[in-house]
Image (spheres, rainbow, N blue to C red):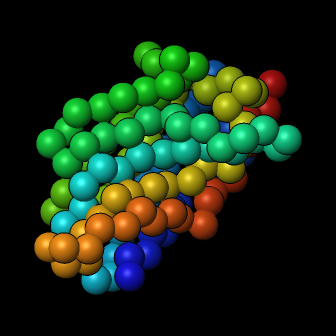
Amino acid sequence: QVQLVESGGGLVQAGGSLRLSCAASGSIFSINAMGWYRQAPGKQREVVATITRGGSTNYADSVKGRFTISRDNAKNTVYLQMDSVKPDDTAVYYCYCSANTSPWVRNSYWGQGTQVTVSS
């Protein structure tokens, strides 16, 4: 099994910055894609940003130019730098990864979520 632990959420004013971190641990053979999703009250969970092991990134249109995803493969950690945040960014942010626990077994894993609240 693989565990994901997020940190860095909290309350921030509109226009400010916040950095989320997510560390993976457990029976890790290799970690493939990693990413961040978010879910606002009354809405479906949506992708925010993803990053491959090689560093290729994708972003939701709503965060392009404001958020930056990165990862440290040596630490099995993914980051989300959130700049110029808006009240619409308020949500629970979930870390995600696709990981192999052996050369033949790959599964998806989720963190427990961290609350980000942006005040206007």
Left-right relation of 11 to 29: right
Residue 16 visible, this orientation: yes
Determine whether, in the image, residue 91 is placed left or right of residue 55: right
Quadrant housing residue 98: bottom left
Which residue is the extreme one toward the right? 42
At a point 38% along the width and 76% down the height, the residue shown is 2
Residue at point 66%, 43% (across, down): 45
Residue 41 sits above or below residue 27 on the image: above
Residue lying at the far front of the rendered structure: 104
The residue shown at (45%, 55%) is 96
Which quadrant holds the C terminus? Answer: top right
Q: Is residue 66 visible?
A: no
Above/below status of 118 relative to 72: above
Answer with the quarter of the image where residue 1 lies. bottom left
* Count of residue discs: 0
Residue positioned 57% across, 19% down in the render: 62
Q: Position of residue 116 (x, y in %)?
A: 67, 46
Q: Position of residue 90 (x, y in %)?
A: 72, 37
42 and 12: which is toward the camera: 42
Residue 104 position in % (x across, y down):
19, 73
Q: Is residue 13 above or below residue 103?
A: above
